[in-house]
Image (spheres, rainbow, N blue to C red):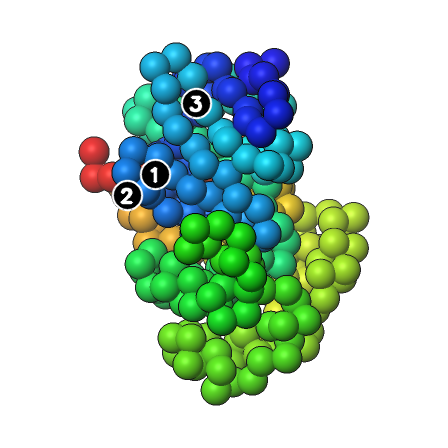
Amino acid sequence: MDYTKEKGRIVFHDKLQFNIEHILECGQVFCFEKRGDDYIVFPQDKVAILSEKDDCVEIVTKHVEFFVDYFDLDTDYNQIKSNLSKFEIMKKPLDFGYGIRILKQDLFECLISFIISANNNIKRIKLILGNLRKNLGDEIGDGVYSFPSFEKLQSCNLEFFKSMGAGYRAAYLEKVCSQITPELLDDWRKLDTPSLRKNLISLSGVGPKVADCVLLFAYHRSDVFPVDTWINQMYNQYFSPLENREKISRNLVETFGNLAGFAQQYLFYYQRSGE
């Protein structure tokens, strides 16, 4: 175990397995802000302040057990990186994003967040999600609001979502809240990955890439490989010319197997950096 728990805080001792910037800035999550040298993270109705110290990372929160699970602290990422390092293409990405961990996000919040993320940029995604939080959530910290409950979002109409800045995604948000419930999403955990992926793609506003993101970042299925512009670029650079993103995804899952989701995050973060 590389961390210790105390009342009101978690101390993670191996900084090679936990880098705050790598984890939060690698495209997997939007519910955070950088404040000075620290980061504040606010999934659902929980808050934590993350600080990098000389020999550790400190997570200050009232919800210690929640964030132990959220940051997947009981998984040995040194072993994951060791297994991935056998692939030549992974060596530079592993060195660059050494401190990445894949978060265990709430199913409903992750689904809504990635529907909003489609064909969108980080700044605007966070703006729309921030608007939803301020209008429908409760204040849980200094200028920080909880993610809206399913019931509150289900009660909103198309015009409301448009007023939040969602644009054409407003129609997706309105419809998807009539297609699912948090209980249904949770019940889908028992499905195998292909069946679960098929169910997700049947939802309004969910294409293959969004489905794979939800599978990886919420259901924690590592046998998927979300493909966006950066991964498409990487594949054509290091593998063979191919523009069919579904086929790229399948090929990369075949290459990396159950490590595919982890490989995707290191490769995406590295490719996007332009290094």
Give me the residue at 62% from left, 32% from top: 64
Q: Nearer the viewer, residue 92 or 51?
A: 51
Q: Is residue 176 left or right of residue 205?
A: right
Give me the residue at 54% from left, 49% from top: 43
Q: Residues within 10 Å of mark 3 (few under 14, many from 20)?
A: many
Q: Nearer the viewer, residue 214 or 197?
A: 214
Q: Is residue 87 left or right of residue 34?
A: right
Question: Which quadrant holds the C terminus?
Answer: top left
Cβ–Cβ under 8 Å for marks 3 and 1:
no
What percent of the width, then of the height, locates residue 124?
33, 64
- Measured along the vertical axis of the image, is residue 123 above or below residue 106? below
| Residue identified by numbered label 3 | 57
| Residue identified by numbered label 2 | 272
Q: Amino acid at mark 3?
A: Val
Give me the residue at 55% from left, 24% from top: 10
What percent of the width, then of the height, locates residue 82?
48, 16
Q: Amino acid at mark 1?
A: Tyr
